[in-house]
């Protein structure tokens, strides 16, 4: 399930669980249903002019789970994938995804990574059928550091690694790792875009970055402070991120 820092990455935070619940109830009032109900839940999308978004999974007892996202509009980053085995979160019916092949423009394999689906239940059966599609992908930074050059990065983080690198959580977590670990990646690349935006619903700022990493461009969001170095266009980014996707076009839904 999403962690508090994932919500902070799009300018959503509250003093405690009670205040956070009240905030979600307020935002849910303007959320719109955009995919068919599935698994006994409605799935409604709330969006802020800043691009911050929440997918609210609502059952008979109210809000069951909330998945954050970032809607970048024309700046959305998209990857071509082929879905593989479904990966579920045993503690939450609405949290799930698939182990996916990430493909290049010719359909050849670049890497393989577990990706969390924004709307898992409505698309679960299609995910299991090895579907090929284009997805909009967002990384929610768990940790981030920025360096003026790759040489500076290597001096601070001595390791044998390429200037563009993508290490999936499936590799880092080892056998038996759960969805929360598998749907992440450690990535390195240069920043091609940096924006500080403000969540209009809360007044809280956050950063929206685009990283040129190994599989392709990746939008990453993170709180406006609390990381190492300065995020500037052209600098080297070293980021550990949770990866969430949604189809960028038509995709079969589960009934």
Image (spheres, rainbow, N blue to C red):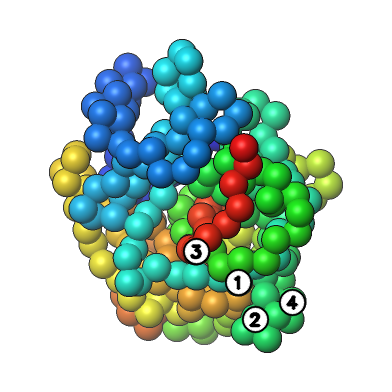
Separation of disc 1 and disc 2 at Cα?
7 Å
The residue identified by callout 2 is 104
Tell me if label 1 and label 2 are in contact, CB under 8 Å: yes
- Front tag of 3 and 4: 3
Count of marks placed on residues: 4
User: Regarding mark 4 in the picture, which secondary structure is present there?
Assistant: strand
Answer yes or no: is residue 54 visible: no
User: Which residue is rendered at x = 32% and y = 65% of the image?
Assistant: 73
The residue identified by callout 4 is 109
Locate the C terminus and report the quarter of the image it occupies: top right
In the rendered view, does 201 fall on the left or right side of 145? left
Q: Position of residue 118 (x, y in %)?
A: 51, 46
Q: In this orientation, which residue lies closer to the viewer: 60 or 197?
A: 60
Q: Position of residue 38 (x, y in %)?
A: 57, 33
Query: Closer to the N terminus: mark 1 or mark 2?
Result: 1
The residue identified by callout 3 is 249
Tell me if label 1 and label 4 are in contact, CB under 8 Å: no
Locate the N terminus and report the quarter of the image it occupies: top right
The residue identified by callout 1 is 80
Q: Is residue 244 above or below residue 66?
A: below
User: Regarding mark 3 in the picture, which secondary structure is present there?
Assistant: loop
Q: Position of residue 150 (x, y in %)?
A: 51, 82
Quarter-of-image position of residue 163: bottom right
Is disc 4 surrounded by few (<14), some (14 to 19) or many (20+) residues within 10 Å? some
Is disc 3 surrounded by few (<14), some (14 to 19) or many (20+) residues within 10 Å? few
């Amino acid at each position: 399930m999403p962690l508090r820092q994932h919500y902070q990455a799009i300018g959503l935070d509250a003093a405690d669980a009670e205040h956070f619940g009240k905030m979600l109830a307020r935002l849910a009032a303007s959320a719109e249903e955009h995919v068919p109900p599935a698994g006994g839940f409605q799935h409604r999308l709330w969006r802020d002019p800043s691009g911050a978004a929440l997918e609210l999974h609502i059952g008979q007892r109210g809000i069951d789970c909330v998945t954050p996202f970032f809607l970048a509009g024309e700046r959305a980053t998209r990857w071509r994938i082929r879905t593989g085995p479904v990966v579920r979160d045993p503690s939450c019916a609405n949290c799930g995804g698939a182990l996916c092949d990430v493909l290049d423009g010719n359909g050849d394999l670049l890497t393989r990574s577990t990706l969390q689906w924004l709307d898992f239940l409505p698309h679960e059966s299609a995910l299991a059928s090895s579907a090929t599609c284009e997805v909009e992908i967002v990384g929610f930074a768990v940790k981030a550091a920025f360096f003026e050059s790759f040489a500076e990065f290597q001096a601070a983080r001595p390791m044998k690694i390429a200037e563009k690198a993508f290490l999936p959580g499936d590799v880092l977590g080892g056998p038996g790792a759960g969805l929360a670990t598998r749907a992440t990646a450690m990535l390195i690349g240069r920043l091609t875009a940096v924006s500080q935006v403000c969540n209009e619903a809360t007044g809280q700022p956050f950063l929206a970055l685009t990283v040129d990493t190994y599989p392709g461009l990746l939008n990453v969001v993170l709180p406006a402070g609390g990381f190492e170095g300065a995020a500037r266009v052209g600098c080297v980014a070293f980021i550990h991120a949770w990866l969430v996707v949604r189809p960028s076009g038509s995709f079969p839904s589960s009934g």
